[in-house]
Image: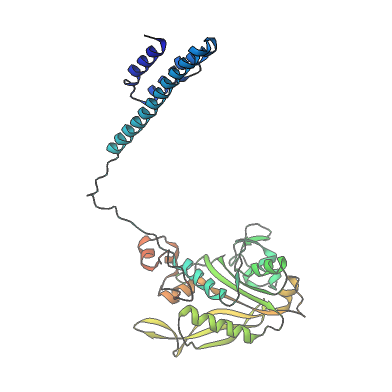
Amino acid sequence: MSDLDKINSIFNAKIDSVKTKEDLQNLKTEFFGKNGQITQQFKTLGNLEPEKKKEFASSLNKIKDDCANQIEQKSFEIENLEINERLKKEKVDVTLPIRPFNQGKIHPVSQVIDEISSIFSEIGFSVAEGPDVETEYNNFTALNTPEDHPARDMHDTFYLEKNKKILLRTHTSPVQIRAMLDGKPPFKIIVPGRTYRCDSDQTHAPMFHQLEGLHINKDITMGHLKGCLDYFIKEFFEVKNVKMRFRPSHFPFTEPSAEVDIGYRIENEKIVIGEGNKWLEILGCGMVHPNVLKNAKVDPKKYQGYAFGMGIDRLAMLKYGINDLRAFFESDYRWLNHFGFDPLDVPTNYRGLSK
């Protein structure tokens, strides 16, 4: 028996005993590695006479190809065996009932923010944001708030430093200042976000959500403000008609200032927004005070505009019949499951905000 026949016989005997990938790799190294038996036979070709060399090379290549094919086939068999073993261990009983699936709900506050943003985006407003931790200047001074104003007192405001220079913002109005200082007019923004005040009862919380609106341009009037709010109220409460009145009021950052009331009636012990003999205050507004524009580096002789602010939590309570503000922050899954919204049902003006 020639050396090639011996090699082929040994290989055939060993490959039959291979059971794992590791065994197969060892066999491959033994015959095809740097010092493998078949590799060593190729190194002897240079020592043979031309006629014997051709015949020997032909036989050697045939054995090499045969062994390589057997290794490939064995690898395929081993992989199939491993897959079958894994499938046996991972067997699933398809007759078992499916596991219960609990889908999360969107919080009413988040829903209302999305609804409001959708409405105002239709008339050209963009959404701006700012930090919850603010400077006293942006929160009060730049907004024309006098030094002796009650809102500056510690029983109304959460101060973070003894010198009262840093605080938790009491409204989202400071973002007005930041937006105007960072850009150039015109400005047309809404600012939803968290605000903080020292207050807590059935209709007030120390942390609540507010939305600020600002529109600055040339020749903006109270008429534009009224038209904007009339459009918003009808779209938000999804009514065709709404009674609305402006009551004179006072805010340091607007002049003239007004509070907006809307008509409502009680029907089946529920508030119905739109028309009725009763009035409900929902927001404050006015024309931006010239001092605020000056503090924000905007020329009040060239530009003017309006601002408005509303409580997002209060709007959610009115629209969806929620009677206790504290429930918003109690993390009660049962409450959220009842008042929450489908996360895939994104509010749009075209198919209904709260569909």
Give the farthest residue toward the bottom.
277
| Residue at left offset 53%, top offset 75% | 119
Label total for image: 0
Query: In the image, residue 67 lies at what x, y percent?
Result: 40, 22
Q: Is residue 149 found left or right of 243 in the rendered image?
A: right
Residue 121 vertical position relative to residue 231 in the rendered view, above or below = above
Q: Does any portion of residue 36 appear in the rendered image?
A: no
Give the farthest residue toward the front.
51
| Residue at left offset 75%, top offset 78% | 300
| Residue at left offset 27%, top offset 44% | 92
Residue 15 vertical position relative to residue 152 in the rendered view, above or below = above
Query: In the image, residue 91 lies at what x, y percent?
Result: 27, 41
Q: Nearer the viewer, residue 222 or 322?
A: 222
Q: State how the image is colored.
A: rainbow
Quadrant in the picture for residue 22:
top left
Query: In the image, residue 348 lies at what x, y percent?
Result: 48, 73
Q: Is residue 283 found left or right of 332 in the rendered image?
A: right
Q: Does any portion of residue 78 appear in the rendered image?
A: yes
Q: Nearer the viewer, residue 211 or 10?
A: 10
Q: Nearer the viewer, residue 315 or 219?
A: 219
Q: Quadrant of the C terminus?
A: bottom left
